[in-house]
Every structure is written in C-alpha cells, then in structure tokens.
Amino acid sequence: MTATVPRVPGPSPEQVVLLQSVREEPCVSLLATTTPAARMTDADARTLQRLAREAGARLARDGAPGGLADALEDLVSAARGEPTGAGIALYVNRTLRQVVRLPVAVPDRVVVDPTFATRDLVRALHRIPRHVVLLLSEQDARLLEGGAGTLRPPRRSPFPLRADDDAGDFLRRVDRALGTFLRLHPAPLVLVGGHRVVGRFRRLSRNTGRLAGTVTGNLTRAPLSVLVPRVREVLDGYLLSRQGEALAHLDRRRSRQAVVEGIDAAWLAARRERPEMLAVEEGFALAARLSADGDFLVPADDVEHPDVVDDVVDELIETVLVRGGWVAFVADGALAGSGRVALTLR
C-alpha cells in the first residue's frame, strides 16, 4: 500500500529525518529551481515534466519496478496546481510519495539511488533556521515564530502585551515574557521596531544572547510580504557569521590534528571515526562508485549508470548526521584549500 506524506510549505527536521531513514532501492529524487508564486508557472511545470521524463527513462534502463514513473508524473501534475517557493523537491519510491517546497534555489537534477537526495533539505534548514521575531513599539509587543519563509504567532506564549503608564516597566515585562518563551523554545532573535524603543530594549534586556540582528523602522504592523524579506536580510548576516564560526572551529581542530580534508578522507573517516562537524561548500557535488567494502570512492563520469552514486556528498552528509555530527554549509571557495570539504572528529 502506498503511504502518502502530506505536503508542507518547507522542510521540517522531522521530514528530513523521515526521508533520510528510507533505504529502499530505487529512490527517485527530482529537484528543480522554481519561481515563487501562488501557482507554479508554465516554465517551471515544463522543467518538472522534462526531469520526470528523464527519470522515467533511467528507471526503464535500470529495469526498475513498474509504476514509479507514473507515480512521479502524477506527483508533477499535482504540484503544478500548488504554490511554489524558490525550489521544489519530489520524492518517489514504492511506498512513499512526497513534495517539499524549498526556500532556497537548487540545481535542476534527477537522482536515482538507494536513498533519497536530501542535501538541499538540510541546506534549507541551515539557510533559514527557526527564529523568533519580536515586534516592539511604545505601546505593544508581539511575538512571531519564523522558518522556511513564514512568520506566525506561536501556539502558546505570553504575547501580545500592551503598555501601561510606565514605559520602562512595560519593556521589562516584555523582556521577562521573552525570556520565558526562549527558555522553552530557544532560537535566534530578530528585533523589529523604531530605533529608540529597540535601543532602550537592548540596553535593559537579559535575553539577547542569541540576537541575530534588528530591523528598525515603522514595521511592527507591516504586511508579511514586507516584513519577511527584511527579516531574511538579518538572518543572512547571522548565517554568514555562523560560517565564520565553522571555519574558526576547523582551525581549532586542526591544531589538535582532529581534521580530515577532502572527500576521500572525509568519506572514510565519517564511517570509521566519530564525526563531529562536516563543513562543505554549498555547490560541491560528486558522482562516484563505491569500493566493495564501501570505504573508498572512485569518481565516475557515467552518472546514470546504476552502479554510480549520483552525489556522494549527499551520502556523506547523511552519514555524519546519522552518526551524531552536524553540518555547516559554507560559500563556494571557502574550503578551496581543503578539497571543498572538511570533517572534524570528536
């Protein structure tokens, strides 16, 4: 019986874990960049159809079980009538059908492997982490939770709050309420409000240890279409600082001889050692064959051959996550001297 997984606006950690847990060959992953819209554009629909035909041809050549190509075509048809983000991922095997809209653009591609291609889902979680936005004015304070391009009030929180006659006491009440929420739901914080009130709040707050940044201006009642891009700018800067932290962590581990560099060494160490942090350039991908014991890689040009793993970087990411490590995506070129990938060990 086919298990249908509900479609959602963006990937959640639970979805990523689910997709990474699947080990049932063949797993078909279809990924494409799309134009954000209330309904998929005709050009994006044609791209998906082309990729679906390519996947069907590969499945036929590999002698895959019947029905998968038809299921993929059905999934493409369903996705055509739905909203799109910056990217889209379709996943099909004998027991699972899933569409995931992504807040990040992805290279258009088809992957047919024993597992699903999830690196772009992991990258999306990294690029737009769950965050909290405090909308602050002289008279009131509201709290929103964000992730994957959305902002909405949390299900349970002490907010919204209204001011009384003592503005200073109001800001302290806001800070206490914020602290209560963040202790239960820790996340990076973005402050939105006028320059004066945001400045006063920052001076007295005890809960800005994970302040990602501020958006100043009369935006506390702005529509989400205006607010979300401004918050995203702040988060982009915050994530850039996280890239710096990851590279600094690599340097510290190098001083302890606890770093392996390059895809071959990282692949072996992720399987044999205790992986801690995998740093990988966002655009790095590699098709390869595996040795009989799975420990060594042989780069391959014939990507569509059934013996070839379409992207061993994706497999490496999954291995590190499954074994308790974490992943830091960095800009292309940031690891040029390390073979585009480096792994720290515990």
Image: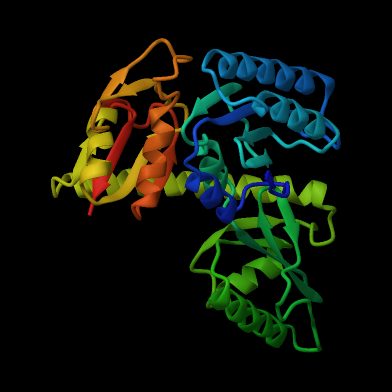
Residue 122 in picture, x, y percent from top left: 51, 44
Question: Residue at coordinates 52% horizontally, 30% vertically from top-left?
Answer: 26
Using the image as rendered, state which of residue 199 and residue 209 is in the foreground.
209
Residue located at (29% from left, 29% from top): 263
Say left or right for 334 vs 107: left
Relative side of 136 to 63, left or right: right
Task: Say whether residue 28 is visible.
Answer: yes
Percent x, y of residue 62? 51, 17
Query: Which of the pair 312/64 is nearer the observer?
Result: 64
| Image position of 263 with respect to 62: above or below | below
Is residue 123 or residue 307 the one in the foreground? 307
Residue 205 in view of the camera: no
Quick check: 285 above or below 239? above
In-front residue for pair 208/5: 5
Which quadrant would the C terminus be assigned to in this image?
bottom left
Model colouring? rainbow
Q: Residue at x 48, y 44 (%)?
A: 240
The number of callouts visible is 0
Residue 270, horizontal then vertical, whole percent:
27, 43
- Kindly indicate the quadrant of the structure image that contains residue 35: top right
Looking at the image, the residue that sits furthest to the top is 302
From what the image shows, is residue 284 above or below residue 278? Answer: above
Identify the residue shown where x is 63% and y is 73%.
201
Instruction: Find residue 219 and report its image quarter.
Output: bottom right
The N terminus lies in quadrant: top right
Residue 135: % across, % down? 73, 66
In the displayed structure image, the side of residue 10 where residue 213 appears, left or right: left
